[in-house]
Image: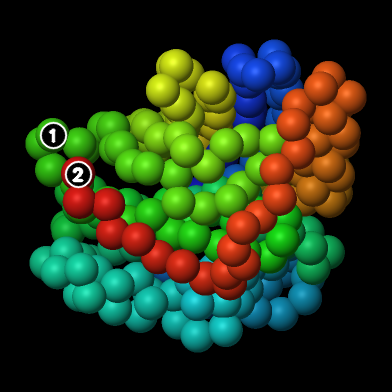
Amino acid sequence: MKSFIYNGLVTHKRFRPVKHFLKYRTFSFLLDLDEIEELDKNYLIFSYNRFNIFSFYNKDHGDRDGSSLKKWVLRNLKKYKLQKNISKIRLLCYPRIFGYVFNPLSIFYCYEKNKLQAIFYEVKNTFNEQHTYIFKLNKKNKNMQFCKKKFFVSPFMDMETNYTFKLINPTDKLFVSIKQRDKRGIVLTAVQTGIRKEFSTLQLVKNFFKYPLMTIKIIFGIHFEALLLWKKGAIYRSRVTKIKNKISFENT
C-alpha cells in the first residue's frame, strides 16, 4: 500500500493585530490516487464516493464535480507546462466521517518516479470557495515556496499579505507550515505535523475513538476561534469577490 494515515497536531499562532494561539490533534489521510478503489474493496469501514464511517469523495476536491482527480491534476500540469512523466499523485486531506468533512488545506504531491516535481495547495474557506496554488518544484524552491495571497480565507486577516509554504516529502513524518507576512513582518504561522501509521482497519478504528467526530469539531473550532478573535478586538473584513473554484500557477 502507498496510502497512509498521519496522526498529529495542527497549530495556529497569530502575532498581529491581536495575539492568538490554538492547537488541536488531528489525523489525515495520504491517499495514492491510483489505489483509492482498492482501499474501498479492502476496508469495510472506508468507502470511495459512497457513505461510510470513513469515506473519500472526488467531489470534495479539484473541480468538485465528482470527476477524476488524477485527470484534473494532469490536465492542470499540462495547462501550465509542468507535465513530465508524472507517475504518482498523492493527496493529503481529512476524510469524511459519517459523511461530513471540511478541509482548510489539502495538498497534492506530484511525482516523476519517486522525485517530487509539483505541489498543489488546495485552500478552502467556510463559504464553500476554493483556490489552488500550483508550484513547479526546482532546486530553488523544492523545500519552500512563496506567493501572494489571492484568496479570502479569514474575515480577520488582510488580503495584502504573502505566503511562505514549507514542507517535507511525507515519509515517516509529516511536516507542513505556512507563514503569512505583511509589510511589517509575520502575521500568522500555521503548522501541521504527523507520524505515519499504516492504512488499516485497526488504525481507522483507533482514530475513530481517539478523534471522535473530528471533522465536525474542525468546523466548530474555526467558528469558535473566530468568536474569540472578535472578542479580542480583531477587525472583521467582508469578502470583496465571490468565487467557486480558482487556480493560480505560482512561477517561483
| Left or right, residue 46 beside residue 159 | right
Q: Amino acid at mark 2?
A: Thr
Contact, CB < 8 Å: mark 2 with mark 1? yes
Give whichever of discs 2 and 1 has the lower sequence position. Answer: 1
Number of other residues with Cα within 10 Å of mark 1, as a class: few under 14, some 14 to 19, many 20 or more: few
Q: Of residues 137 and 52, which is closer to you in this image? A: 137
Q: Residue 107: x percent and y percent? A: 45, 52
- Look at the image and tell me whether residue 77 can be seen: yes
- Looking at the image, residue 116 lies above or below residue 186: below
Above or below, comparing residue 203 to residue 131 in the picture? above
Element under disc 2:
loop
Q: Is residue 115 left or right of residue 91?
A: left
Please state the horizontal and vertical placement of residue 234, each as a whole percent of the image: 76, 26
Secondary structure category for the residue under label 1: loop
Image quadrant of residue 26?
top right
Residue drawn at x 20%, y 36% is 141
Task: Look at mark 1 in the image and give the residue it sits on.
Answer: 140
The Cα atoms of the two marked residues, 2 and 1, are separated by 8 Å
Instruction: Using the image, determine if residue 105 lies above or below residue 14.
Output: below
Looking at the image, which is closer to me, 4 or 82? 82
At a point 17% along the width and 58% down the height, the residue shown is: 112
Pinpoint residue 237: horizontal percent, then vertical percent. 70, 43
In the picture, which quadrant includes the N terminus?
bottom left
